[in-house]
Image (cartoon, rainbow, N blue to C red):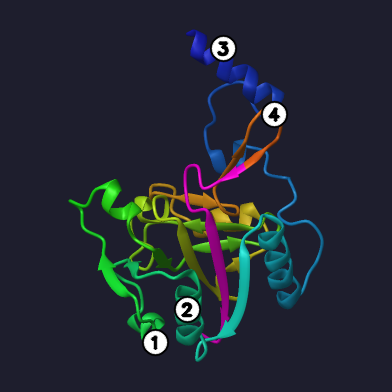
């Protein structure tokens, strides 16, 4: 028995599972944990998402499908963005009212070129209400991971209630683990030993989330 087998056996024993290698993860791993905390209506779940997003210093907006293009245009104008980065599969109607120049993500593009872009607009894969987390999975309306990590301003559109779940376990059921998953809880931030908060260190300094209904 290798050291690896010993360590993994101890982990399994600590988790209350069999000491030996699992025959099936579906049956041998204890999954009796809570799938969500409390009981909420669909509307309450969306409200909780908005509350937790704001708590993480994301800026939250609400609109319907008809109002989405004009809202995105207003946000880009308020930001003063001259250019907006566009994932290849972003619905064209989302930017139908926007004035900034569209920039398509190019594989040969550099981080410096992305840094010169004013804003990026994407969709999302799922949003978790209990943690205020937005998950991107590299789908066509979200693009590659780097386009949401380099530009300083990220507008993320969440379709409600279809893309909103209560908990992380529920989110994991919707996600494909082999895809490039990016979990976002508020704008990028860090702090030093004195707890001085600095935003925009390894991602966008400003995250605006649009909860759009009827899309």
Q: CA distance from mark 4 to mark 1?
A: 54 Å
Element on which disc 2 rests: helix
Choose the circle earlier in sequence order: 4 or 2: 4
Magenta residue check for 208: yes
- Disc 2 or 1, which lies upstream in sequence? 2
Q: Earlier in the sequence, mark 3 or mark 2?
A: 3
**Which percent across, then down, holds residue 88?**
28, 68
Task: Please tell me whether mark 3 sits on a helix, a strand or a loop.
Answer: helix
Q: Nearer the viewer, mark 4 or mark 2?
A: 2
Q: In the image, which residues are magenta?
A: 198-215
Disc 4 from disc 2: Cα separation:
47 Å
Given the current orientation, which residue lies at the most extreme bottom position? 66
Q: To which residue does mark 4 refer?
A: 15
Q: Which numbered marker is on residue 6?
A: 3
Q: Position of residue 55 (x, y in %)?
A: 72, 57
Upstream in sequence: badge 4 or badge 1: 4
Image mark for residue 72: 2
Residue 1 visible to the viewer: no
Q: Decide: is 99 above or below 134.
A: below
Residue 162 occupies which quadrant of the picture?
bottom right
Q: From mark 3 to mark 2, how far is it between C-alphas?
A: 54 Å
Q: Are marks 4 and 1 in contact (CB under 8 Å)?
A: no
Q: CA distance from mark 2 to mark 1?
A: 8 Å
Mark pair 1, 3: CA separation: 61 Å
Q: Position of residue 208 (x, y in %)?
A: 55, 66
Asked whether disc 4 touches disc 2, contact meaning CB atoms under 8 Å apart, the reply is no
Q: Is residue 186 left or right of residue 202?
A: right
- Determine the secondary structure under disc 4: loop
Q: Secondary structure at mark 1?
A: loop
Q: Which mark is residue 97?
A: 1
Residue 124 falls left or right of residue 111:
right
- The quarter of the picture where residue 165 lies is bottom right
């Amino acid at each position: 028995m290798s050291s690896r087998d010993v360590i993994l056996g101890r982990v399994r024993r600590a988790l209350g599972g069999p000491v030996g290698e699992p025959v099936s993860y579906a049956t041998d791993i204890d999954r009796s944990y809570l799938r969500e905390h409390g009981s909420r209506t669909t509307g309450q779940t969306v409200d909780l998402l908005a509350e937790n997003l704001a708590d993480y210093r994301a800026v939250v907006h609400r609109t319907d499908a008809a109002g989405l293009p004009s809202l995105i245009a207003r946000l880009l104008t308020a930001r003063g963005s001259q250019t907006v980065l566009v994932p290849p599969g972003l619905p064209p109607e989302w930017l139908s009212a926007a004035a900034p120049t569209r920039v398509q993500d190019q594989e040969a593009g550099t981080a410096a070129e992305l840094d010169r872009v004013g804003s990026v607009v994407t969709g999302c894969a799922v949003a978790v209400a209990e943690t205020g987390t937005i998950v991107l999975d590299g789908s066509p309306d979200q693009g590659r991971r780097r386009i949401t990590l380099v530009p300083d301003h990220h507008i993320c559109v969440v379709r409600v209630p279809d893309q909103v779940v209560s908990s992380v376990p529920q989110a994991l059921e919707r996600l494909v683990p082999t895809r490039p998953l990016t979990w976002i809880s508020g704008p990028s931030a860090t702090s030093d030993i004195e707890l001085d908060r600095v935003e925009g260190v390894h991602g966008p300094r400003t995250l605006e989330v649009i909860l759009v209904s009827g899309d």
